Image (cartoon, rainbow, N blue to C red):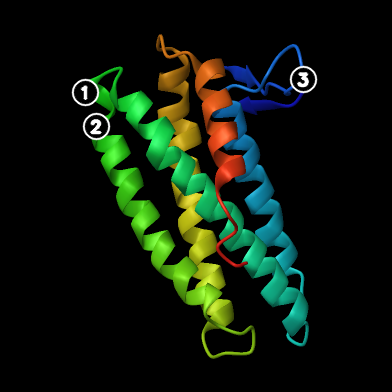
Amino acid sequence: MRTHTTKSKAIPKAIATESQPADAISMLMEDHEHVKDLFEQFEGLGDRAMVSKKKLVDEICNELTKHTMIEEELFYPAVRSIGKEFEDTIDEAIVEHASAKQLIAQLLSMDAGDDLFDAKVTVLSEQIDHHVEEEEGELFPKVRKSSLDLVALGRQMEERKQQIPDPAG
């Protein structure tokens, strides 16, 4: 079992099984890790790997689009419902999502050889790193301590995620 450590304690990372579905936070953290891996793969590609770069960026954009949608449609409203203490954090996350969505739309309409393509991928990666740091370091630990049913929410999020078409086609 992998653990994610915060300043206060280690949080076991739940692994989804038929008897134990992943909870909402574990699901989001798995998404974070997957996208981080995709960004690292992108960084490892050479300047001439245009087809691979475009495929990887399309996958990154698909994953981020689905992730932001389930957060905005299900996770954030559920978190808002448990207390006003989360308002500012959720508002900031939504603004960060809007900024990421702009870059995602631009990247989906570009070719890997276009001017600023690599720069936009780098900026998107940096924005996502910052967003993930705040969620995993501040928001998720507080939500874990709440009364929110994270397993039921995780099920809803997984169902919704399966319904979202890939924006890149």
Where is residue 139? Give x, y as percent.
41, 30
Where is residue 65? Give x, y as percent.
51, 54
Which residue is denoted by mark 3 in the rendering? 17
Q: Is residue 73 above or below residue 146?
A: below
Q: Is residue 152 above or below residue 136?
A: above
**Residue 79 seen by the camera:** yes
Residue ID at (43%, 31%): 75
Separation (CA) of disc 3 from disc 1: 33 Å
Give the mark nearer the N terminus: 3 vs 1: 3
Amino acid type of the residue that numbered disc 3 sits on in the rendered structure? Thr
Separation (CA) of disc 2 from disc 1: 5 Å
| Callouts 2 and 1 close, C-beta under 8 Å | yes
Which residue is denoted by mark 1 in the rendering? 84
Give the mark nearer the N terminus: 2 vs 3: 3
Query: Which of the two marks, 2 or 3, is nearer to us in this view?
Result: 3
Considering the numbered disc 1 on the image, is that residue within a helix, a strand or a loop?
helix
Where is residue 13? Give x, y as percent.
67, 24
Amino acid type of the residue that numbered disc 1 sits on in the rendered structure? Lys
Which residue is denoted by mark 2 in the rendering? 87
Considering the numbered disc 3 on the image, is that residue within a helix, a strand or a loop?
loop
Q: Is residue 24 left or right of residue 35?
A: left
